[in-house]
Amino acid sequence: MEQQTKEVIISLTEKAANKVKSLLEKENKPDYGLRVGVTPGGCSSYMYDIGLEKAPKENDTVIEEKGVKMFISPESIAFMKGSTVDYIDSLTNAGFKVNNPNVKTTCGCGHSVG
């Protein structure tokens, strides 16, 4: 069941929104959205799950911001509430980065959170 909400659960920076739009255009997937969430795994209990998806899953919350649809599962909402997704493009690293105020631990690799 698709849910719509006005509550701020997760937000996108302008740079992240532009990157998502660029990816959707490049891959010819104009109706897709961005899946944002956490999955069990990694050395600190959870790993971020970010990718393009055609449609929300049952019980997902759908958030539209800066022209981008985001899909987030109920399990991920509690862990990610108040987070911001940014896009980093530096000489040594490029990709989406989640700034999450709920994180208590991280690991050395930077991909796992708890």
Image (cartoon, rainbow, N blue to C red):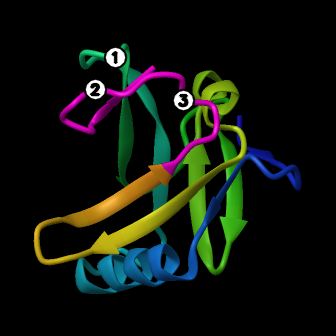
Q: Is residue 109 above or below residue 43?
A: below
Residue lying furthest right: 6
Return the mark for residue 57: none
User: Which residue is labeled 2 in the image?
Assistant: 107
Figure quadrant of the C terminus: top left
Mark 1 vs mark 2, CA separation in Å: 6 Å
Residue under pointer 3: 103
Rendered residue at 24%/85% (across/down): 26
Tell me the amino acid under the disc marked 2. Cys
Instruction: Left or right? Give the position of 114 relative to 3.
Output: left
| Front position in the image: 23 or 110 | 110
Q: Earlier in the sequence, mark 1 or mark 2?
A: 1
Give the percent coordinates (x, y) of residue 57. 54, 36
**Circle 1 residue:** 44
The answer to whether 19 is drawn above or below residue 83 in the figure is below
User: Quarter of the image holding residue 23?
Assistant: bottom left
